[in-house]
Image (cartoon, grey):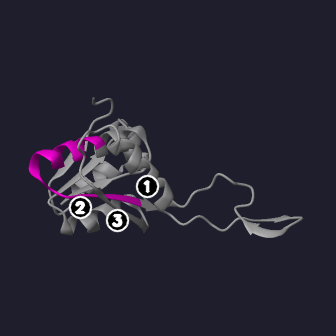
Amino acid sequence: MILIGVDGSPASREALRWALRQAMKTGDTVEATMAWLREPEFVAATSMGVHPHADRPDHRHPAEELHAIVDEVRATVPGAPPVAEVTVVGDAGTALSRASRQADLLVVGTHGHTRLSEVFLGSVAADCLRHATCPVVVVPPGRT
């Protein structure tokens, strides 16, 4: 199984596209995983009552977001295999590294941050390279 980390960025979309093409060559299944941190429940009082996220009508659940991204990317890869979709609560690097225990290959995109920014900001790709239990492919930015 090819595991792919998806966060909605152009880099993760390109990584998903790469994983789909690879799966077509190898016959592997594909699992797209989106990790997310729970947001605090922001509650807004309106004339209709109290509603979480009332100030964000465009707010979508991560599962809906992942599904939309997978559909969008699969449409650009003719003959793309089906994709299992998984959302998990937690840090992306940790979640993907744990999920890598069941995978043959982990694919992640990179935003192209410099080494210095990784020190301060961290990097999901760097976490996966350090902690995944299967081979990791890091798809660089701008790959076509």
Q: What is the C-alpha distance between the residues marked 1 and 3?
A: 15 Å
Nearest to N terminus: mark 2 or mark 3: 3
Residue 95's mark? 3
Instruction: Look at 28% across and 36% down and name the residue there.
Output: 140
Q: Farthest residue toward the right?
A: 47
Mark 3 residue element: helix
Say if mark 2 contacts mark 3, CB within 8 Å: no
Q: Residue 89 lies in what quarter of the image?
A: bottom left
Nearest the eye: 53 or 122: 53
Residue 11's mark? none
Please state the extent of the stretch shown in magenta in the rendering.
17-34
Residue with the mark numbered 2: 131
**Given this view, does label 1 or label 3 mark the residue nearer the observer?**
1
Nearest to N terminus: mark 1 or mark 2: 1
Q: Is residue 144 magenta?
A: no
Instruction: Look at 42% across and 50% down and name the residue there.
Output: 7
